[in-house]
Amino acid sequence: MSLSPRTRRLIAYPLAVGVAASVAWFGFREVVPDVPTLVGAASVRAGMAQQIDPASPDGARLRAELLAEAEELASRAAAQEPASALVLETRAFLALVSGDAGEAARLYGLARGASDCEPLHHDLLALHEAKAWSNAGEVDRALAVLESTSPPDSELIALDRESLRVRLLSRGSRARDAVDAAIALSDQPWTGSAEAAFQLLEAMGALDAAASVLPKSPWRRALQDYFLARLKLRSGDTDTAGSLLERSLATGDQEVERRFRRDRDLWVAGDESGRFEQLMTPRAELATPPGAR
């Protein structure tokens, strides 16, 4: 059955009025974003600013614009919930990206003391606060944060926390404590603890201690031989270093090859005989007959 033009107009008119009213309501009504929305938007902008090289074309301007937008959004969130752990953490992150590590540490401290801060969140904020104090050059204050808080339940946070503590100890006057702490870290059941301990000890120049924790790592034999070779090279025992290096390279382990080439400067600096330089010849080149090159 077809409708008359008059009937169609009678049906269409109220529908059109309803649509127009909806558009007017949703288009002109002021929507106030909630705190999670505001801090999320602020964090995204701050994260984008953090990735921009200020020395690149327009880099400084873009960073400044993004950080200004992030600050405005964070201020709006703070106006709603000034004592919120989430808001304080966001403001701390903004301060850190803006280059004010001391203010970031202060705000992280306030965030972990907020009434709505959950236990796991508290552990992460304590780690962020210690890192911020470290970035600000306040080693003792960073250590105080770590040593006054309980060990976290999260293995990942615990490993990061203890690794930071070792680095902080090595920067101060407690080098022996740093070595002991790294060795203790190697005995922890956390995934990656022995590897982290080895890397920290090697970076500190505690070569004997690094060699002692190496067997605790889950690294395959070829990698362990390579790392031990590197330690022997740094200690001046080039003969042992060369033997271990040749043994590890003979396995054809690609990770060993990659690390060997990445550490080229270290090996060349300790290469008086040219032995290590010769080992850097690509394996494929060595395997290719001269006439086929």
Image (tube, helix red, strand yellow):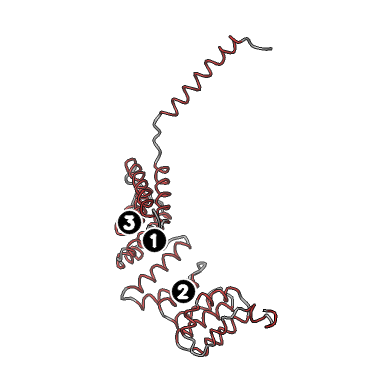
Which circle marks residue 199 in the picture? 2
Which circle marks residue 104 in the picture? 3
Classify mark 2: helix, strand or loop.
helix
Which circle marks residue 105 in the picture? none
- Residue occupied by mark 1: 127
User: How many marks on residues?
Assistant: 3
- First along the sequence among labels 2 and 3: 3
| 134 over 228 or under it: above or below | above
Q: Nearer the viewer, mark 1 or mark 3?
A: 3
Determine crowd level at label 3: few under 14, some 14-19, many 20+ residues with C-alpha closer than 10 A: many
Determine crowd level at label 1: few under 14, some 14-19, many 20+ residues with C-alpha closer than 10 A: many
Q: Residue at x 52, y 16 (%)?
A: 14
- Whole-angstrom CA distance, mark 2 to mark 1, is 20 Å
Q: Nearer the viewer, mark 2 or mark 1?
A: 2
- First along the sequence among labels 2 and 1: 1
Percent coordinates x, y for residue 245 in the rendering = 56, 83
Classify mark 3: helix, strand or loop.
helix
Q: Amino acid at mark 1?
A: Leu
Q: Residue at x 46, y 74 (%)?
A: 199
Q: Amino acid at mark 2?
A: Gln
